[in-house]
Amino acid sequence: MTVEQIPVTGRPGRRPAARPARTAPAERRRISMTGRRHRAFYLFTAPWTIGFLLLTVVPMAYALWLSFTTYDGISPNWRYVGLGNYGELFSDPQTWKSLGRTGLFAITSVPLSIIAGLGLAVLVNRPIKARGLFRTLLYLPAVVPPVGAGLTFKALFDQNSGAANGVLTLFGFDALGWLADPYARYVLLMSVLWAAGNVMIISLAGLQDVPRELHEAARIDGASAWRTFRSITVPLLSPVLLFQTVTGVIASVQTIMPLLLTPDGTTAGVTALPQSNYLYMMHVFSQYFALGRYGYASALLWVLFVLILIATGLIFRFTSGVVFYNVDPEAKK
Amino acid sequence: MTATSLPPDSAPRVRIRVHRLVLYTVLVAVTGLFVGPFGWLVLSGLKTPAELAASPVHWLPSHVQWHNFADAFHLIDFLGYARNSLIIALIYATLVTLSSAWVGFGFARLDAPGKKTLFGILIGSMMLPQMITLLPTYLIFAKLGMVDTYWPWVFWGLAAAPYLVFLFRQFFAGLPRELEEAAIVDGCGYGTIFWRIFLPQSWPVLSASFVIAFTWSWGDYIAPQLLLSTDRSTLAVAVMSTYVTSAGTPVANLQAAASVMYVVPILLIFLVAQRGFVAGMSTTGLK
């Protein structure tokens, strides 16, 4: 509390004042205020730093420890097996298959929902009647909780009573077993695209920040609508799109929708999933819940964690040249 | 909005009209695709089990079974589960909104050595799949005897959520510096500045954050399934797994009716908060 006691050491020239001091206030007060800001910063960020340590770092470390053991939660005879779980994991064909499916799912679902969401945003950013209503209706599926979405898609793609097969038979096609192999993956993809309103709403906010003058200038220069979109809108939205890509990839890795699309929809029934929807996280669940292999499942989780780090690193790396940041807050009038 | 900008010749006028026709057709068709599935769920909830099992599809229920909704309400302790969901969601959303605003203020308006690193970790932790931490967290909570209590949600709430922190940071960073300068000169502490000056300015983000967090919690399926016993669990879990006959066969029509009742509160909350929500997302600051 005694702010005056903060020693006037350190590197005074290192941190310039936010703007050049116009009237040269008392040096002493400036320094003490810096100290106060420092302490306030740590105080303000403490809930997150402490929470992060206790609720993320500690569990992650615990999982790392478990991944070297045969812990199953019940048996007292668990033992340390070193890298045994990791060795098993790499030779487990299910790991590779489910990993491949997860990668494929992310690579298809993320770009598709970004394109769909951006398209919707452009559509409802136009001066149209009942714009608010359209925006709301398109966004609504994105707020439907996973369980609601799972049950909705189950009803929609039910072999007998589903509307999807209703439409197919209406046009003389055979009814399909949508929720089984090999179609289950498409139902999963559609359930993700159904929530494209999430991308829409964030892109819409980004679109509204695009200065109107830029578009007008481009139009005067004779640029087509597509050209304007490509050369002005997309670059200005690129940070938003990058954010969507990264969060989209991470969300798609941990989707539990396949689970909710199964007949009994519980974690115990994870082994009954159609093959095409047996994603990596499902493999983790099946080891964790169905088999109680906490050690092995923890090793799977850690591998996934490292893979996600690598994937996000690569995304940032490859987009660093094309993402346009306008971070200078002073430039914004 | 078009009358003033129309050129005198009529060819572009026709083109604009065709253009608008296409635009509205696309818009209505796409909206239909997005709303349709939900309509189908409602219809499924109004049919008899026989109709749901029949093939080919019965598009409309021959006799609308309104009582399905009442039956779904009584077959399980719907109200009890709804209350559990509500308690958890309110605890979590309130705490996490306040803690995230608090942390977001720190990252937006204050600094100290290590700020960049901390912020990097915060953003990085957004990329950390929660599912990865959830399973070991569950084991730890189990060891601490906090399984089947709502304490985990209190802790998760107090710990702030990186996504919401980022939302608040963006918003607070956009506010003019003059806002706190006078208060600092007057000797106000940062706590006062946050509480009295910044928080009242940020109702769009506050409501957005609350809605987002409430939706997360209401929609969360894995955490309550892991941490809570059947009685104390949430509607999300109950709707998914308890609609079965005594013989164990699922009752699809009641489950559909129940999931409508489960989803509608979220839709209503969103509709009410929509204005503030969109404004909050655009993080425009003072205008």
Image (cartoon, coloured by chain):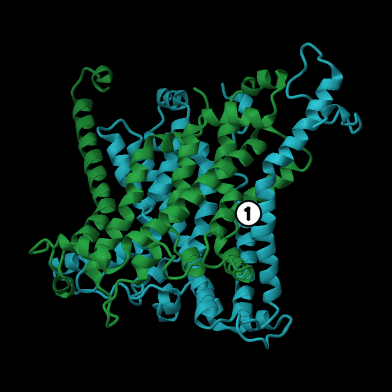
Q: Is residue B6 left or right of residue A195?
A: left
Rendering coords of residue A113 (x, y %): 41, 53
Rendering coords of residue A135 (x, y %): 33, 40
Rendering coords of residue A82 (x, y %): 74, 81
Q: Quadrant of residue A173?
A: bottom left
Kindly indicate which chain is depicted in cyan in the rendered structure.
A
- Quadrant containing the C terminus of chain A in the rendered view: top right
The residue where tag 1 is placed is B125
Chain to which the residue tagged by mark 1 belongs: B
Q: Is residue B256 left or right of residue A190?
A: left
Rendering coords of residue B282 (x, y %): 47, 35
Q: Quadrant of residue B109?
A: top right
Frontmost residue, A114 versus B8: A114
- Indicate the colour of chain B: green
Q: Residue furthest left?
A: B62
Q: Is residue A170 left or right of residue A159?
A: left
Q: Quadrant of residue A84?
A: bottom right
